[in-house]
Amino acid sequence: MPRWVTPITAILALPPTVLAYAALLGLGLHRHGAPWAVALVATLLVYGPAMIATWAAPKHRVPLFLGVLGAWSLGLLLSMPVYFPGERQHAVATGLALVARGEGGEGFARGVAASLPEEPAVSEPEVPLAAVLVEAEVPPPAPLTDREIALPYDGEGRRLAVPVAIENGGRTIESWMLLDTGATYTTLPLRTLAALGIVPGPDDPQITLHTANGEREARVVLVDKVWLGDLAIEGVAIATCDECASGDTIGLLGLNVTGGYNLLIDADRREAVFSSRTATDRRVDVSPFVDLSATFTRFPGGRVEVAVRLRNDGPRTVTSAEAGIHCGAESWLVAVGPVAPGGVGTARQRLPEHPACDGYRIALEHASW
């Protein structure tokens, strides 16, 4: 065999071997494999077939080893889009960055990965990217249907009161409440809550209320239902506020109730018309009773994963929740749930590629009971 065969074979085998080995390292790390296990399996998968072929050959073992190694490695790279769609470029970047440590190593790894040809669309990814946070379009007002109620109101200007029924544990109280579109939470005094069988305690969530008389601390509790005529909202958060009651009203009817309806004030008939909305975000009611946190993992090569954790301290099941992940001008949504009372829900997702930021912010964007 000519002497030039061995060096030429080595030169041709080197690029696919390095790329295949780096891709296998990256795939293993992205799946949170133990580093020693990832390195061992990658070594066996890349070099094993060539070593077996060389052991069985009677002569010319070096060029045979290099030829089988290069062809096998190229086959691994070409088959990855079938089993790991959309992951080859990220895996190569992570694997190369792990090997090429030091100044400029990560940039080199990204550059090599970006130079790879586009993957053929031969299969679908198993786990989608986190959804980009897009504000929902506000639907037009719903036509008048049987899901509409017209309640008489009392008062003038910004002090309008409407009749409300509050139900909890089989008890119901009917009274008038001030229709306050500037109040986030519906409020009740302690005496009314006691009549409903609720006694707020130190274990209940605490918030700061902004009232006409200044800021004050308040406990938040849940009532079973708030009725507007024959329309009801379940699992309503109520803030304690004795000062928010007056001689004619028992408290403020906040946006966590009225936001579930399209509201029309008919001044001619002195009626407040409430029309049920198609979908209502219950984030305001849910947020005091949950604890939301997140951890971020940045792999060599630039891949970033977020693990979201939501603990439900409330008495009702959180049927769905969406955490907003914010990084500078970029935002994404990660869905969590359902989460039973006292339970913890988790979700892990990969974030799309994005510019570096000083830190990630997480917030409860949407939730429902």
Image (cartoon, rainbow, N blue to C red):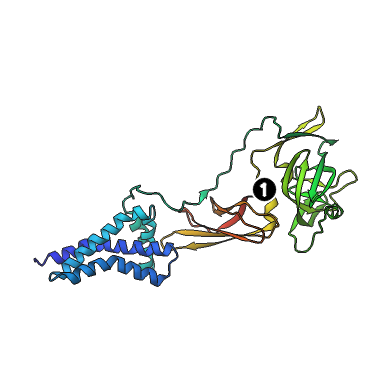
Q: Name the residue tied to disc 1.
A: 282
Q: Quadrant of residue 176?
A: top right
* Badge 1 density bin: few <14, some 14–19, many ≥20, Cα 10 Å: many
Near-viewer residue (60 or 317): 317
- Horizontal side, residue 154 vs residue 82: left or right: right
| Residue farthest along the left direction in this orientation | 2
Q: Who's the residue at 80% across and 59% down the image? A: 200
- Which quadrant, please, contains the N terminus? bottom left
Q: Who's the residue at 81% across and 56% down the image? A: 198
User: Residue 151: in sight, yes or no?
Assistant: yes
Q: Who's the residue at 26% across and 58% down the image? A: 74
Near-viewer residue (104 or 344): 344
Near-viewer residue (35 or 6): 35
Q: Who's the residue at 38% across and 68% down the image? A: 38
Q: x and y percent of residue 328 in the render?
A: 54, 53
| Residue farthest along the top direction in this orientation | 268
Q: Amino acid at mark 1?
A: Arg
Near-viewer residue (331 or 198): 198
User: Residue 104: in sight, yes or no?
Assistant: no
- Horizontal side, residue 119 vs residue 295: left or right: left
Secondary element under disc 1, as helix, strand or loop, is: loop
Q: Quadrant of residue 219?
A: bottom right
Q: x and y percent of residue 246 in the render?
A: 88, 47
| Residue farthest along the front direction in this orientation | 170
Considering only vertical position in the picture, is 46 above or below 267? below
Q: x and y percent of residue 190 in the render?
A: 85, 55
